[in-house]
Amino acid sequence: MRSQSGGSDGSGDGPARPRRGAAGRAHDPSMSGSRRPTIEAPRQRTQPFTWARGNRVLAAVPADELAFLRPTLVTISLGTGAILYEQGSRIETVYFPDTVVASLVSRMENGAAVEVGTIGNEGVVGLNLFLGADVSVPEAVAQIPGDAQRMSARDFRSALDALPRFRELIGKCTHAFMTQVSQTAACNRLHGIEQRCARWLLLTHDRVGGGDEFPLTHQFLSFMLGVRRAGVTEALGALTLAGLIRSGTGRITILDRVGLEAACCECYAIVRRHAGEPFDVLE
């Protein structure tokens, strides 16, 4: 994967706002690095998705429709940084993530980049085809390594025409993803790096089958959030100091799910709720 040059801290050009700390409070620059951040009383805990039986879309279609789909699917493994689509490229393949987590990244001419959405086992990579477009505007890249089911664009279109329940699920997944993209845009503009980092970690935690540890480097997370690596290191340091996560050797471990949700903004809960709606699940 190409390295990021430059980046934005998400503050935009508007009036300066107080920086938010790990509990969503105004950041005090004089706070000692050895002082444990104060964490607000946690909101009601949401259990992470513990689905571990492959892609949820494929699992939700009726048996007769799945029998139609099976011959068109091929299982593949994707490593961190694997490119699914180049920015602006034609979509020839659709991916149904099993354990891989994919990121859609928008790149600027100056080399800066920011993540605009992520897709795990709750969705499909290549939803543009459902809307009648065959070009991927953002780049699609594997952010967490794992397996996926691959299908050609031609077979995907045929399945949409032939399978009513499959088409209905893809439509609902498209709506859920559009909700995520719009919420991410608002979050990147209005919320601090620690809150955004907590949101990203929670969404990833949901998509790795309930496992509390997953591979992630500071550099890769800075690329996903569109900020400098130093900003990510500071944000992860605050979450670590609060006892919410452990970060090191290219891996993140979630230690306190309740506390991490308290440190997050409301965007996580909104995205999470809509991600479950295609499956009539509000967890």
Image (cartoon, rainbow, N blue to C red):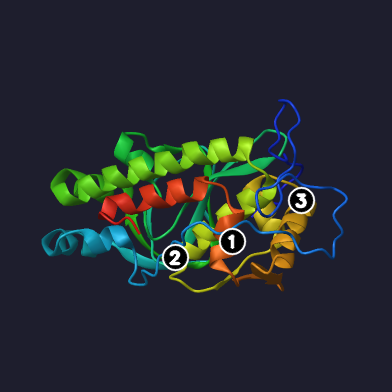
Residue that label 3 marks? 231
Residue that label 1 marks? 260
Tag nearer the camera, 1 or 3: 1
Q: Residue furthest front?
A: 41
Which label is found at residue 39?
none
Mark closest to the chain's N terminus, 2 or 1: 2
Q: Where is residue 27 drawn, in percent x and y? A: 77, 47
Badge 1 amino acid: Leu
Q: Where is residue 277 drawn, in percent x and y? A: 30, 50
Residue at horizontal 76 percent and vertical 58 percent from the top: 233
Residue that label 2 marks? 48
Q: From what the image shows, is residue 174 above or below residue 51?
A: above
Mark closest to the chain's N terminus, 3 or 2: 2
Badge 3 amino acid: Gly
Q: Where is residue 229 drawn, in percent x and y? A: 76, 53
Q: CA distance from mark 3 to mark 2?
A: 26 Å
Q: From what the image shows, is residue 209 above or below residue 260?
A: below
Give the class, few, some or many, for how many residues have Cα within 10 Å of label 1's Cα (few <14, many ≥20).
Answer: many
In terms of secondary structure, where does tag 2 sit?
A: loop
Kindly tell me whether residue 85 is visible in this rendering: no
Mark closest to the chain's N terminus, 1 or 3: 3
Tag nearer the camera, 2 or 1: 1
Kindly tell me whether residue 30 is visible in this rendering: yes
Q: Residue furthest left?
A: 64
Residue at horizontal 36 percent and vertical 34 percent from the top: 133
**Image quadrant in which you'd find residue 79:** bottom right
In this orientation, which residue lies closer to the viewer: 218 or 247?
A: 247
Give the class, few, some or many, for how many residues have Cα within 10 Å of label 2's Cα (few <14, many ≥20).
Answer: many
Quarter the C terminus occupies: bottom left
